[in-house]
Amino acid sequence: MSNPTYEVATVGGGCFWCTEAVFQEVKGIHKVVSGYTGGNAPGKPTYREVCSGLSGHAEVVQITYDPEVLSYRDLLVIFMTTHDPTTMNRQGADVGTQYRSVIYYHNEEQKLTADIVIAELAASFDAPIVTEVSPLATFYEAEEYHQNYYKNNSSQGYCSFVITPKLNKLRKLHIDKLKKA
C-alpha cells in the first residue's frame, strides 16, 4: 500500500457487486476488492463453488480506506444502512449462506466497534439485526470479471434493478460521505 495510514475492513451484505458499488462511491475509500471468506472448503474457491452454498464462504468485499477521512464506525453505518441486516442468509432474491450479512473483523477494536454499531442501529429496524460478526479468516480475491462489476456493466438488468436503487439509497442517506457529493 502506498499510504501507511490506510486500514482494511471486510464486509458481506449479499451480492458483492452491490456492496462493491456502494463503497466505490464513498470518500476515503482507496480500493474495494470483491472476494470470498468465512468458509471451510480447501483451497481458493471459485464463484461457482461459492454460489453452490457448499463452500461455506460468503461473498464479501475487502475495503482499503483512509481512517483520517472515513472512520471504521462510519464505514459500518454505511454498510448496515445500504443492505438489509435483518434477513438471515438472504438479500432480495439472492438466497443462501453465501449472501449472509457479515462483518469480518481484523482486530479486537474492529470487533468492539461492530458490536457497538449494531447495538446503536438496532432500534432503526423493524426486525432484529442478524449480521454475523466474526474474525477474518483467509480472504480470497474473486475472479477478475467480478471486480468493478457495476462500473463495467451498469446497463445490465441486475445492475439497473438491484444495484442502482442501492446507490440511490446511499445518496439519500449519506450524501455527506460521497466522493462526488
Image: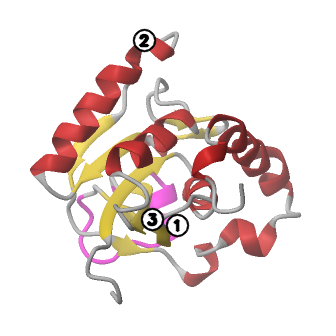
Q: Which of the 4 quarters of the picture holds residue 64?
A: bottom left
Q: Secondary structure at mark 2?
A: helix
From this view, report whether residue 80 is shown above or below residue 28.
Answer: above
- Which of label 2 and label 3 is nearer to you? 2
**Part of the protein shown in magenta:** 40-55
Q: Quadrant of the N terminus?
A: bottom left
- Tell me whether circle 1 and circle 2 mark residues in contact (CB < 8 Å): no
> Neighbour class for label 3 at 10 Å: few (<14), some, many (≥20)?
some
- Which of label 1 and label 2 is nearer to you? 2
Mark 2 or mark 3, which has the lower sequence index? 3
The location of residue 88, given as percent across then percent down, is 44, 28
Tag on residue 49?
3
The location of residue 22, given as percent across then percent down, is 61, 54
Mark 1 or mark 2, which has the lower sequence index? 1
The location of residue 54, given as percent across then percent down, is 38, 53
| 53 magenta-colored | yes
Distance of label 2 from label 3 (alpha carbons): 36 Å
Please identify the dominant SS of the magenta region. loop
Q: Which of the 4 quarters of the picture holds residue 94?
A: top right
Residue nearest the viewer, comparing 65 with 53 = 65
Question: In the picture provided, is 173 more to the left or to the right than 105?
Answer: right
Residue in the picture at 76% in, 75% down: 152
Q: Secondary structure at mark 3?
A: helix
Q: Secondary structure at mark 1?
A: helix
Q: Amino acid at mark 2?
A: Ala
Q: Amino acid at mark 1?
A: Arg
From this view, report whether residue 89 is shown above or below residue 33.
Answer: above
Q: Amino acid at mark 3?
A: Glu
- Tell me whether circle 3 and circle 1 mark residues in contact (CB < 8 Å): yes
> Neighbour class for label 2 at 10 Å: few (<14), some, many (≥20)?
few
On the image, numbered disc 2 is attached to which residue? 123
Residue in the picture at 43% in, 50% down: 12
